[in-house]
Amino acid sequence: MEKQFFMVYAEGQGAPTYKHENEQAASKEAERLAEKLGVNTTVLQAVKMVAPKDITKRVKTYADACAVLGIEPMNETVLAKLGFTKDEIAYRKLKTIAEALNEGWRPDWANSNEYKYWPWFVYNPASAGFSCAYTHRTASNAGATVGSRLCYKTRELATYAGRQFEGLYNDFLLIKK
């Protein structure tokens, strides 16, 4: 069941914009506005919230991704005090964003016929973009072009994530002073 909320509408003032957690708080605000503005006010109860179907319309920020997943955003101040670096915090944010954008899809690494996509960055000193990390001639000769938790189910989602969250990817991929 969705969490209900209440809003106050004051005649002639446009659409209500503030959500109240309970009817008492909304009623108190309605009374305050009625006195202040000298107009009739109405307490509205949300019966159903309708979100856009397109996930890219719902996830524009890290906080949006948390809301879609029903989790609390990280407290970056506390994490920094615990010794987490900017790139570690960015990675955790990007994992949350990828999970939200993929809407439950998880890559099947045993299936080589399943495409998996990730943003590809070209280094640009003006914007501090990053292209790719690759290890070569190590004992295992492993390619490290993308973290498996940061891939997307479609090319469009990968492109969107790379553009919309470019700053976070830069924080994650680049060593900055």
Image: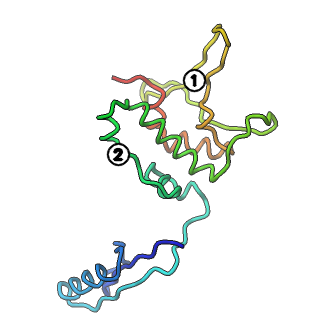
Residue 4 position, x and y percent, is 45, 76
Indicate whether 96 appears above or below 72: above
Mark 2, Cα crowd under 10 Å, few <14 / some 14-19 / many 20+, is few
Which residue bears the numbered disc 2?
75
Q: Is residue 113 left or right of residue 166?
A: right
Type of amino acid under label 2: Asn
Residue for point 58% across, 47% down: 99
Q: Looking at the rendered structure, which numbered label has been put on residue 132?
A: 1
Q: Is residue 100 left or right of residue 24?
A: right
Indicate whether 163 appears above or below 63: above
Residue 8 position, x and y percent, is 33, 81
Q: Is residue 82 left or right of residue 48?
A: left
Residue 61 position, x and y percent, is 45, 50
Q: Give the mark, 2 or 1, whose residue is nearer the N terminus.
A: 2
Mark 1 residue element: loop
Judged from this view, the residue extending furthest toward the front is 82
Q: How many marks?
A: 2
